[in-house]
Image (cartoon, rainbow, N blue to C red):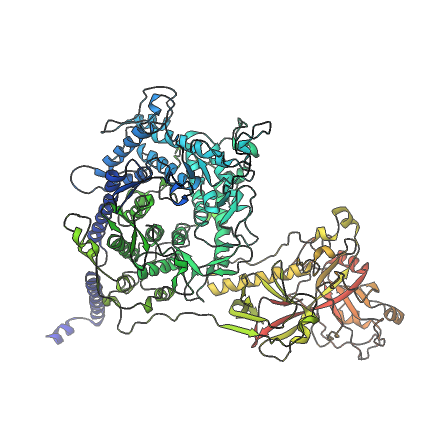
C-alpha cells in the first residue's frame, strides 16, 4: 500500500509533504515540552497576578487594621510603628517616618494600579479602597487649603514637628501624593474610571482661592475630589524648600517639617538680610551636612511635576540645580561619589559604585530626560525674594533645564560605569564593583541589593543586552539565598561584613519587570514567581510581611517598610499583568525611584520644540526590537551560554541538593486565601526553574559555554639593591598613575585584556592592574623612570623586556617666548588647549572586539598627542610643570625617523630626562648651536658650518630627502660638531594634528602614517658613498615650528621605550 501511495505522488510533492510532516513533528515536540514544563500561558500568569493581589491586600489590610493612622505596622506584633520620639538620633526610623500615615500615602498609587485589573464580581474593590484612602488622608490632614477645611483631625497639612530626610520624604510622601492626584484626575489611566471632563478640569485647577465650595470629581464615598492631594503636596514641597539654603545648591539631608533648618547655623537661610543670624543656635551643633548623591540629585522628577502642576517654578529650579551641582563635581573620569558635603561641595569618600548612596542619581538622569522630553523650560523667575533659596544663584540656563542635557549626563555616566565600574566577561560574568572615584581602581568586590535597579535602567535606556547580562547575577544571588542580601562579596562568595538582611527591597523584581517589557521573555515571569514564592514562604506575618534579618537563618524583623507595598508588590503585579494600561501607555511617563508613576500633562494641541538643538545621534536612537524566539525554545535568556557563568559568581554550583522545604505558613493556609500549596512546600531555589531548567528542555549532553577568563601574570623584582642610592621614594602617585623610581621589591600584577594593533594585527595586550597590591584604574599608567629602568631591565629578559622605539622619538626644545606667546600669557598657557583628532565613523562596526580595539587605539593616540605637549605629572619637586622657567619653557615634540636603504641609525646620544633633578632643576640641553638652511636643494653647506653647529634645520620640499642630505658635507664626528638633521614638514597630515597646541603658533604634529623615504644610499655632493651617514628626523609644524627651532635655546632628544612580557606588549607601562 505504501508503494502504491508513493507511486501516486510525484517526487516533488513527496518532498513537500515530508517537509511539512517534519515541521508538524517538531511543533508537536515543542508543544508537548511546553505543556509538560509549564510555559507561563495566560491562565498561569493570571493566577500569579491574583496571588500578588492577595499578597498586597494582606499587607494593606493589616496596616489599616493595626497600624493606621501611624506610619507603619509591625507585622509580627500587630502594633503600629511610629517615630522614635525618645531618641531623635534613631535615623533608621526618624529619617523616614514623618508622622503623616506614610504607608497609606505611599500605597495610594499601588491601589490605583490594581484598580485597572480588579478581581471578583463585586465591583472594583481596589478603586473603592483608593478613593477611601484619599478621603482618610483629607480627614486626617485637611484639604491643603488655607481655610477651615485645611485643618485635619491630626494636623493642618504637614505642619508637624518631625525632622525627616529630604530624599525619603520626597520620594515616598511627595511622590505618592502627586502620583495619586494624577490618577484621580485621569492623567494616568485606570481602566473603567473616567471622570467627566468638567469635573476633571475643576480638580486640575486645584486652588480654592478662599472658596468653601468649588467643583470637582464626585466619588461614590461622598468625597468631591477638587485637588486636595495636590494642595497637600504643595504644602509638603514648601516645607522641604528650606533644606536648599546652601551656597552649593546641594540640599541639606534633613529638614524639620515645621521649623525648617534651625540646626544648621551656617545656612544662609538662618541669616537676616542684614547678616544677623536668626537662629538661636549660633554655635556649631554637630549637625550632619553630608548628603548622598542619590539623596541630593534624585529630586528632579517629583519637584518638576509639582512645579508644572502648580505653576510654581521654584521646586523644579531647586531640584535641577541640585542635580547639576552633583554632576558638575564629578571626577575627571566622569564618576560621582556617594557622599558630599552640602556646605562645601567636597566629596566625603574616595570610592564609588552604582548602589547605595548613588543609585537613583543615574536613574533620574535618564528618567528626567523622558519626563521633560518636548517640554519648554518653566517661565524665567522675576519675583524672587530674599526668602527664596533661588536668590543665592543666577537662574539656570536653557541647557540646564533641557531634557537632552539630562540624557547627555546619563550617556557620560553610563560610559564611565561601563569602563571603570563594570568588570567584563574576563571575570566569569559581567558585574559591578566598588572603585576609586578619581582613578577607577578597584576598591572592593561587593555588590549591594540596591544595585539591582541598574539592569532595569539599562533596559529602559535601550541597553537591553547589557541589562540582561547584569540581571542574571542578581537572579542567581536570589536563587541561592531566597532573597537578596544587602551585600554580597563576589570575591569571597559570602555575605559582606555581616550585612545579610533583606528588608523587602524591590529592585531585583523592578528590573525583571523592565526586562520583561523589553523582551517578553518568559524567563522573567519565572523570576518573579520565584521571588513571590520566597517572599510568601519566608516573610509572612500575621499582620503583614516582615523583613529578614539574616537571609541564611531566616530570622525575621518586625517591620514592613512602606516600599514593600509601594514598589515590591506593585512591580510583581505589573509583571504578571501584561495587558495593564500602564504597560501599554505610549506617553512620556516614568516611575519614580519609589515606584510612583509620574507624568507632566501635555496640551496635545501644542507641538513643543526643544530648547537646544538635539544632536543627530539622539534623534536617531531607537529601542532594540524584541529578540526573535529561538527554534524549539521558550526562552532566549534560558538558552544563553552565560547563564551558568552568572550562577558561578553566586556559587550556585557549590550548593548542596535539598528536598522539599516545609514552610511556617502551613498552619495558616486554611484561613488565608493568599497562601497556596506552592508556598507551603517550595523547592530549594537552586534546583528551581528558572535556574536549573526543566529536564525536558535540557539535552542529555548539554554543557555551558566555556567560561572566559583573561590570562593574568605577576612579576616580582628582588630586593637586592641598596635602596639608599635613590633619593626619591620608590613609588610616587602622579596625575594619571604611578611613577616608579626604583624596581627594588616591586611586584606588578597584570591582566591580558587590552585590545591593540601591533603591525596591523589585532592582539590582546597586558595591563598592569596592581602594583604591590595597590589597584590601578583602567586608564592609569605605570611610569618607569628611565634612569632606573635602563640599568635594571635586560633587553634579553623575556619576562620584562625593554624595547626601544626605532621609529618615533621626542625632540626636547628649550625656547623663549614668541611675540604671540607674550600676548597670550606664555608658553605654558598655550599648552593643553583643545586637540582635534579625526577618527573613522564607528557606527557600522558591530564586532565588540573591533570596537574595543578602536577605543584602545584612540586612547593611545590621545596619549601620543599629550606627549607632544610634554609629560605633565604633578609630582612636587619631581616632574613638576611649575618648575619650568616661564620664559624658556621646555616642550617635547614628536619626531619620526626615515625609512629606506639610505636611512641611518640614530647614534646613542645622551637622552634628556623627563624628570627634574632632586633639587628641582632641569638639566641643560646638549645642543645649543642651530643652523637653519632652508630647503637645501641647490647649494652645498660649507664644512665650517657643520664643525660649529650641532643641528642643521631644513625645510621639506622642492627636492628629495636624499638630495638634501647630499648637500651636507662629511666632517669628523665630534660632540661640538654636527649631530642631527631636522627636517620640518610643511604639509598638514591627514592623521593627527594639534592646532595651536605646542607653541600657540598653529603648529602641527607630523603625520606618522607616512615616514620620510630615503630610497637610495646616502651619497656626498660629488656622488661618492658616504662613510658617516647623516642622522635625520622629521617634525611637523610648518613655518611656525621652523622659526621656533631656529630660535631655540637648546635641543636634545628623548627616546621612546615600551615594555613587553613574553613578547606581548604591556599597554600601560611607559618609560620616561
| Residue 939: percent from left, percent from top | 85, 68
Q: Is residue 1020 above or below residue 338?
A: below
- Residue 805 seen in the current view: no
Location of the N terminus (image quadrant)? bottom left
| Residue 733: percent from left, percent from top | 62, 61
Outermost residue toward the left? 1
Outermost residue toward the front? 86
- Occupied quadrant, residue 694: bottom left
Residue in the foreground of this view, choosing between 56 and 963:
56
Image position of 861 (left or right of 637): right
Residue in the foreground of this view, choosing between 252 and 1054:
252
- Occupied quadrant, residue 991: bottom right
Location of the C terminus (image quadrant)? bottom right
Q: Name which residue lies at 26% across and 65% down.
A: 687
Q: Name which residue lies at 77% across and 55% down.
A: 885
| Residue 183: percent from left, percent from top | 32, 35
- Occupied quadrant, residue 5: bottom left
- Residue 700 seen in the current view: yes
| Residue 323: percent from left, percent from top | 50, 42
Amino acid at each position: 500500500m505504501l508503494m502504491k501511495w508513493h507511486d501516486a505522488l510525484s517526487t516533488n510533492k513527496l518532498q513537500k509533504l515530508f517537509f511539512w510532516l517534519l515541521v508538524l513533528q517538531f511543533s508537536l515536540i515543542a508543544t508537548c515540552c511546553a505543556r509538560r514544563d509549564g510555559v507561563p500561558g495566560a491562565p498561569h500568569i493570571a493566577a500569579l497576578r491574583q496571588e500578588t493581589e492577595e499578597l498586597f491586600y494582606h499587607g494593606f489590610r493589616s496596616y489599616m487594621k493595626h497600624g493606621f493612622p501611624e506610619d507603619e505596622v509591625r507585622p509580627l506584633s500587630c502594633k503600629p510603628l511610629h517615630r522614635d520620639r525618645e531618641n531623635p538620633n534613631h535615623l533608621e526610623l526618624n529619617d523616614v517616618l514623618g508622622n503623616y500615615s506614610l504607608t497609606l500615602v505611599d500605597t495610594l498609587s499601588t491601589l490605583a494600579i490594581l484598580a485597572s485589573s480588579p478581581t471578583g464580581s463585586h465591583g472594583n474593590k481596589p478603586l473603592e479602597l483608593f478613593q477611601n484612602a484619599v478621603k482618610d488622608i483629607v480627614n486626617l490632614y485637611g484639604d491643603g487649603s488655607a481655610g477651615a477645611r485645611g485643618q485635619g483631625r491630626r494636623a493642618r497639612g504637614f505642619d508637624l514637628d518631625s525632622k525627616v530626610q529630604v530624599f525619603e520624604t520626597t520620594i515616598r510622601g511627595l511622590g505618592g501624593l502627586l502620583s495619586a492626584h494624577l490618577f484621580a484626575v485621569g492623567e494616568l489611566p485606570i481602566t473603567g474610571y473616567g471622570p467627566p471632563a468638567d469635573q476633571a478640569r475643576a480638580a486640575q485647577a486645584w486652588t480654592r482661592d478662599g472658596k468653601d465650595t468649588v467643583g470637582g470629581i464626585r466619588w461614590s464615598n461622598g468625597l468631591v475630589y477638587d485637588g486636595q492631594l495636590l494642595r497637600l503636596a504643595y504644602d509638603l514641597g514648601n516645607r522641604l524648600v528650606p533644606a536648599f539654603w546652601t551656597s552649593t545648591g546641594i540640599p541639606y539631608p534633613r529638614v524639620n517639617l515645621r521649623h525648617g533648618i534651625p540646626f544648621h547655623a551656617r545656612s544662609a537661610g538662618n541669616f537676616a538680610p542684614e547678616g544677623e543670624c536668626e537662629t538661636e543656635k549660633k554655635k556649631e551643633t554637630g549637625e550632619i551636612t553630608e548628603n548622598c548623591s542619590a539623596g541630593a540629585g534624585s529630586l528632579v522628577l517629583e519637584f518638576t511635576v509639582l512645579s508644572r502642576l502648580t505653576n510654581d517654578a521654584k521646586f523644579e529650579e531647586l531640584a535641577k540645580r541640585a542635580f547639576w551641582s552633583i554632576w558638575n563635581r564629578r571626577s575627571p573620569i566622569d564618576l560621582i561619589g556617594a557622599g558630599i558635603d552640602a556646605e562645601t561641595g567636597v566629596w566625603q569618600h574616595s570610592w564609588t559604585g552604582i548602589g547605595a548612596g548613588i543609585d537613583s542619581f543615574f536613574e533620574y538622569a535618564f528618567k528626567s530626560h523622558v519626563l521633560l522630553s518636548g517640554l519648554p523650560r518653566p517661565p524665567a523667575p522675576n519675583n524672587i525674594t530674599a526668602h527664596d533659596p533661588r536668590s543665592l544663584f543666577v537662574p539656570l540656563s536653557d541647557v540646564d533645564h533641557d531634557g537632552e542635557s539630562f540624557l547627555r549626563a546619563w550617556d557620560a555616566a553610563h560610559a564611565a560605569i561601563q569602563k571603570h565600574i563594570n568588570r567584563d566577561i574576563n571575570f566569569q560574568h559581567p558585574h559591578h564593583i566598588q572603585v576609586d572615584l578619581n582613578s577607577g581602581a578597584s576598591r572592593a568586590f561587593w555588590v549591594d541589593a540596591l544595585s539591582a535597579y541598574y539592569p532595569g535602567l539599562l533596559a529602559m535606556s535601550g541597553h537591553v543586552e547589557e541589562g540582561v547580562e547584569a540581571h542574571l547575577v542578581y537572579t542567581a544571588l536570589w536563587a541561592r539565598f531566597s532573597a537578596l542580601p544587602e551585600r554580597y562579596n563576589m570575591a569571597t562568595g559570602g555575605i559582606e561584613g555581616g550585612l545579610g538582611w533583606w528588608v523587602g527591597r524591590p529592585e531585583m523584581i523592578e528590573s525583571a519587570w523592565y526586562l520583561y517589557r523589553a523582551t517578553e521573555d518568559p524567563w522573567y515571569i519565572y523570576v518573579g514567581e520565584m521571588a513571590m514564592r520566597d517572599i510568601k514562604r519566608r516573610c509572612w506575618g500575621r499582620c503583614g510581611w516582615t523583613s529578614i534579618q539574616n537571609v541564611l537563618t531566616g530570622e525575621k524583623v518586625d517591620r514592613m517598610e512602606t516600599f514593600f507595598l509601594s514598589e515590591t508588590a506593585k512591580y510583581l503585579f505589573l509583571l504578571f499583568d501584561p495587558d495593564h494600561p500602564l504597560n501599554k501607555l505610549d506617553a512620556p511617563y516614568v516611575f519614580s525611584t519609589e515606584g510612583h508613576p509620574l507624568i507632566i500633562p501635555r496640551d496635545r494641541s501644542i507641538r513643543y520644540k526643544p530648547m537646544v538643538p538635539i544632536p543627530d545621534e539622539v534623534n536617531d536612537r531607537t529601542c532594540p526590537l524584541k529578540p526573535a524566539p529561538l527554534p524549539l525554545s521558550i526562552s532566549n535568556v534560558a538558552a544563553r551560554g552565560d547563564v551558568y557563568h552568572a550562577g558561578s559568581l553566586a556559587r550556585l554550583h557549590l550548593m548542596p541538593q535539598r528536598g522539599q522545604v516545609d514552610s511556617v505558613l502551613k498552619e495558616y493556609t486554611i484561613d488565608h486565601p493568599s497562601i497556596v500549596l506552592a508556598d507551603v512546600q517550595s523547592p530549594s531555589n537552586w534546583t528551581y526553574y528558572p535556574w536549573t531548567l526543566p529536564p525536558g528542555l535540557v539535552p542529555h549532553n548539554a554543557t555551558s559555554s566555556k567560561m572566559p577568563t583573561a590570562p593574568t601574570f605577576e612579576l616580582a623584582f628582588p630586593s637586592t639593591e641598596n635602596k639608599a642610592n635613590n633619593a626619591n621614594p620608590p613609588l610616587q602617585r602622579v596625575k594619571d598613575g604611578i611613577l616608579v623610581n626604583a624596581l627594588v621589591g616591586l611586584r606588578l600584577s597584570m591582566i591580558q585584556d587590552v585590545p591593540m594593533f601591533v603591525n596591523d594585527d589585532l592582539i590582546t595586550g597586558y595591563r598592569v592592574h596592581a602594583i604591590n597590591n595597590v589597584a590601578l584604574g583602567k586608564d592609569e599608567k605605570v611610569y618607569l623612570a628611565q634612569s632606573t629602568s635602563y640599568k635594571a631591565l635586560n633587553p634579553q629578559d623575556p619576562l620584562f623586556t625593554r624595547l626601544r622605539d626605532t621609529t618615533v622619538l621626542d625632540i626636547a626644545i628649550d625656547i623663549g617666548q614668541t611675540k604671540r606667546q607674550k600676548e597670550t600669557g606664555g608658553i605654558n598657557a598655550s599648552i593643553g588647549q583643545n586637540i582635534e583628532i579625526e577618527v573613522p565613523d564607528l557606527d557600522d562596526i558591530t564586532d565588540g572586539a573591533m570596537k574595543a580595539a578602536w577605543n584602545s587605539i584612540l586612547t593611545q593616540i590621545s596619549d601620543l598627542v599629550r606627549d607632544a605637549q610634554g609629560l605633565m605629572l604633578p609630582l612636587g619637586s619631581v616632574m613638576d610643570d611649575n618648575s619650568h622657567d616661564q620664559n624658556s619653557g621646555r616642550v617635547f615634540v614628536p619626531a619620526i625617523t626615515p625609512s629606506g636603504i639610505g636611512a641611518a641609525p640614530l647614534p646613542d646620544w645622551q637622552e634628556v630626562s623627563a624628570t627634574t633633578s632632586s633639587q628641582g632643576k632641569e638639566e641643560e640641553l646638549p645642543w645649543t648651536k642651530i643652523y637653519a638652511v632652508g630647503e637645501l636643494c641647490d647649494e652645498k653647506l660649507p664644512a665650517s658650518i657643520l664643525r660649529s653647529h650641532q643641528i642643521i634645520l631644513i625645510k621639506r620640499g622642492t627636492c628629495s630627502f636624499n638630495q638634501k642630505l647630499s648637500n651636507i658635507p662629511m666632517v669628523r664626528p665630534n660632540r661640538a660638531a654636527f649631530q642631527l638633521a631636522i627636517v620640518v614638514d610643511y604639509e598638514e597630515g591627514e592623521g593627527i594634528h594639534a592646532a595651536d597646541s605646542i607653541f600657540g603658533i598653529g603648529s602641527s604634529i607630523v603625520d606618522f602614517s607616512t615616514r620620510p623615504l630615503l630610497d637610495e644610499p646616502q651619497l656626498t655632493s660629488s656622488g661618492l658613498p658616504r662613510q658617516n651617514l647623516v642622522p635625520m628626523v622629521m617634525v611637523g609644524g610648518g613655518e611656525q615650528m621652523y622659526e621656533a627651532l631656529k630660535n631655540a635655546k637648546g635641543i636634545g632628544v628623548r627616546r621612546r621605550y615600551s615594555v613587553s612580557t613574553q613578547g606581548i606588549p604591556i599597554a600601560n607601562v611607559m618609560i620616561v
